[in-house]
Image (cartoon, rainbow, N blue to C red):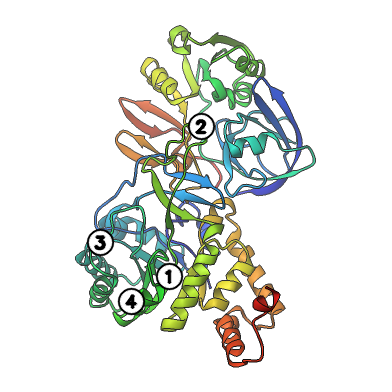
Amino acid sequence: MQREALRVLASEPVGPYRLLRLARGRLDPGMPGQFFMLSPPGHLLPRPMSLCLAPPRELVFLIDPVGKGTRALAEAEPGETMTVLGPLGNGYCLRVEKPLLVGGGIGVAPFPYLSHALGEPPALLGFRTAHHAAAAALVPNAEVVLDPTLVTDVMPSDYDVFACGPEPMLWAVARRAPDAQLAWEAPMACGFGACYGCAVEIGGELRRLCVEGPILELKASRWRKVRRREAA
Amino acid sequence: MILNASGCLDALAAPDVARRLDAFVTKTVTPLPREGNAPVRIAETDAGMLNSIGLANPGIDRFLAATLPRLAELAIRLWVSVGGFATDDYADLCRRLDERDEVQVIELNLSCPNVEGPEETVVDIVTAARASTGKPLFAKLSAAVPDVAATATAAAEAGADGLSLVNTIRGLALDERTLAPTLATATGGYSGPALRPIALAAVFAAYRATGLPIVGMGGVETGRHALELIAAGASACALGTVLFADPRAPGRVRTELAAESRTHGFETPLAARGASHTIVSSLLSDKTKKPAIASEM
């Protein structure tokens, strides 16, 4: 597990979100869909964030400042340092034929990095408002729908779907595309299997999202692990 | 000696962290498998965090058959924490673990705030456990009792070889916007920095009452915090919440503890054990000298 205090380079507004740019240090960006634990200044516990972009010498995260911890992350000033642990968890499996990215709200966070790795496939992104949809500019080849239209209303079939977004959206995507790779979210204290806080119900069982996910595939109401991370 | 607090580390998921400990304490094992409580199960709060994991574990059968052999491969000292819902549960768990050479110490979890506790008293449970195993038994107690010293004494008289102090204390957090409880179970176990003075007081009282070996825990983040627990009477200290944010804490706290001990004139950390009691005694015996705090007030 790699952990390092990284320098904050910038925190840029993107609609209601913030794009937090950190100097990469010696940390590996990992696979798209993997996540990092970011320690907000002044807080006891780190917060899980999937990597949004990995330009040279940077790690970039899209933050939705909805709580005390995420607000502290979003308000970090350039020049401050922030302790970061990662990459953690299991990323998306990239060996697919016809990728389509389907995201909702802050769920677009891992897509810029994922899109780059997949050669900029089409993306379908849903947002509550046009203000939130500013984040779509980070994702190449994105089609945007706004509330009340849902991404699943317009989602084409016969694609290899990569999805990330609120839980009801993920369930709806899985009903339309049973093979979809779904990125899930849960409150998490550690990110490496210690706290058991991120348990999610999987086919009637509670499992730790940090070690078994966060990317999971749903088939016949049963989940399975898509991919183990390659390095501990 | 630095351990983890039970339930704050999975040695199989993070073996490199576990290897930096002097002993690894397992998550509490119960007679039957438990999935734990429904999510949401954790929440950060002022000066700490709440958890309502609810003793998620594979149950003793699977633990002995699958988990314990894998833990043994890590070649670290193993303490197994056990929990039950009746005296007989603890006796059975201890009997099963007694047969396993991989297990060095059994910790009796007598104080999880997230599950319905057994009706029986600490005395009944420790007595039953004592009769079921020859392995060292540590009783993990809560500070949320009227008299920690009395509970510690009861555990000692019933045959406990040591004490683990303290477990989390029940707490509640409300959602910033909705004011609904953040955790699905409403309340959870409160841990982190806020527990430090509570843990110190419990260790201080239990050391004075029993003289037993004590694993002190509760909000330890630095070597200074560990030294304070040792000075209050702990013979070892365990790391809990800090491990979530800093998996390198075992090595760091160990180094800081050694340096902090030397700064205070102790050759080793353990040489500081109980030092706060000695200082209190000398102050009380010297009637002409008032405690510093009183003179400042």
Q: Residues within 10 Å of mark 1 (few under 14, many from 20)?
A: many
Question: Which residue is pictured at 58% across the width and 87% down the height?
Answer: B278
Taking the image as shown, residue B148 lies to the left or right of residue A140, namely: left
Label 3 sits on a secondary structure element that is loop
Furthest-front residue in this view: B297
Frontmost of labels 2 and 4 is 2
Which chain contains the residue that carries disc 4? B
Q: Is residue B160 above or below residue A214?
A: below
The residue where tag 1 is placed is B164
Question: Which residue is pictured at 38% across the width and 40% down the height?
Answer: B184
Give the residue type at disc 4.
Ala
Give the residue type at disc 3.
Pro
The residue where tag 3 is placed is B118
Q: Same chain for marks 2 and 4?
A: yes
Furthest-left residue in this view: B88
Which chain contains the residue that carries disc 1? B
Choose the circle earlier in sequence order: 1 or 4: 4
Choose the circle earlier in sequence order: 1 or 2: 1
Residue A160 at x, y percent in the picture:
47, 18
Query: Which of the numbered marks, if any, corresponds to residue A155?
Result: none
What's the CA distance linking mark 1 and mark 4? Answer: 11 Å
Question: Which residue is pictured at 46% across the width and 49% down the height?
Answer: B50
Residue A15 at x, y percent in the picture:
66, 19
* Residue B9 visible somewhere in the drawing: no
Choose the circle earlier in sequence order: 2 or 3: 3
Query: Which of the numbered marks, if any, corresponds to residue B177?
Result: 2
